[in-house]
Amino acid sequence: MTAGAGPVVRAGVATDVGLVREANEDSWFARGSVFVVADGMGGHAAGEVASAIAASTLGELAHRDDLTVPDLVAAVAEANRQIVQTAVRNPRQWGMATTLTGVVLAHADGARAWVAFNVGDSRVYRYAAGTLTQLTVDHSEVQELVDAGYLTAEQARVHPLRHTVTRSLGRDRAPVVDTWVLPVESDEWFLICSDGLTNEVGDEQIASVLAQAGPDVQAAADALVRQAVANGGRDNVTVVIVEIVG
């Protein structure tokens, strides 16, 4: 895949409904300069609508060679507006919401850069030289407890409030979008995922699966989703892995 006249980008995508849920409410977009995952909330025929709107709205930026961080933030706000308007027109979908996270190739401080962003508890990781680093910070009740020192990260993974997010798309007021600007480098991967992965597979195991998968981003995405299902598959799981080629 290419992002305009910029770097050549390759992506691997995998998703699974899991072993418990009846429908897959996750959505994704991975093309051009935009790579995102959205995890819908609000029940069948609602959460999947919210996540699809979020992913497709961000996908409209994929052809842009002049993309900036303000453009990204504006697109998230537009996705929120469309989700709210759709719910107003369809009362059965009222209350639907979604997380949204990903990376985009944009211009920042006069240079081409990766911009990681998130709203909610879906995550972006960077994987380079065998080291996995979480870039985004969850917007969740348990993350606030971790930040305050009341829970460890391991306790948070099994805490009853782990599914309670503090920011999402689908509210009257557009949420604050957290962003991180990173230089474009070779020999690195970005892992974008819904919490169906991270609630089942810890960071150490994620890194191990990536190491064993070899250089193929599609094989790595498939392997992570298989591992999440094997570990319990209690939620939908979606993984997008992105790399600069060369």
Image: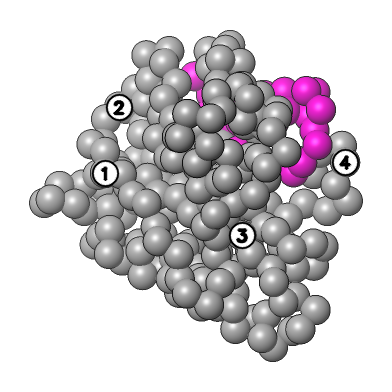
**What amino acid is found at the position of numbered circle 3 in the picture?**
Thr
Disc 4 element: loop
Pointer 2 local density, CA inside 10 Å: few below 14, some 14–19, many at least 20:
few
Q: Whole-percent x and y of residue 82? A: 55, 78
The structure residue drawn at horizontal position 36% and vertical position 31%, both measured from the top left corner, is 245
Q: Nearer the viewer, residue 229 or 122?
A: 122
User: Does label 3 or label 2 sit earlier along the sequence?
Assistant: 3
Residue behind mark 3:
98
Judged from this view, the residue extending furthest toward the left is 110
Give me the C-alpha separation between circle 4 and circle 3: 19 Å
Q: Residues within 10 Å of mark 1 (few under 14, many from 20)?
A: some
Q: Earlier in the sequence, mark 1 or mark 4?
A: 4
Q: Nearer the viewer, mark 2 or mark 1?
A: 1
Q: Position of residue 131 (x, y in %)?
A: 41, 16
Is residue 35 among what the camera can see? no
Q: Nearer the viewer, residue 54 or 4?
A: 54
| Dot 4 or dot 3, earlier in sequence | 4
- Give the percent coordinates (x, y) of residue 43: 79, 62
Identity of the amino acid at label 4?
Answer: Val
Q: Return the residue at label 1.
A: 181
Quarter of the image with the C terminus in it: top left
**Which one is earlier in the sequence, the residue at label 2 or at label 1?**
1
Please report contact status of discs 1 and 4: CB closer than 8 Å, yes or no: no
User: Which mark is on residue 20?
Assistant: 4
- Residue, x 59% and y 51% (percent of image)? 165
Residue situated in front as seen by the camera: 227 or 29: 227
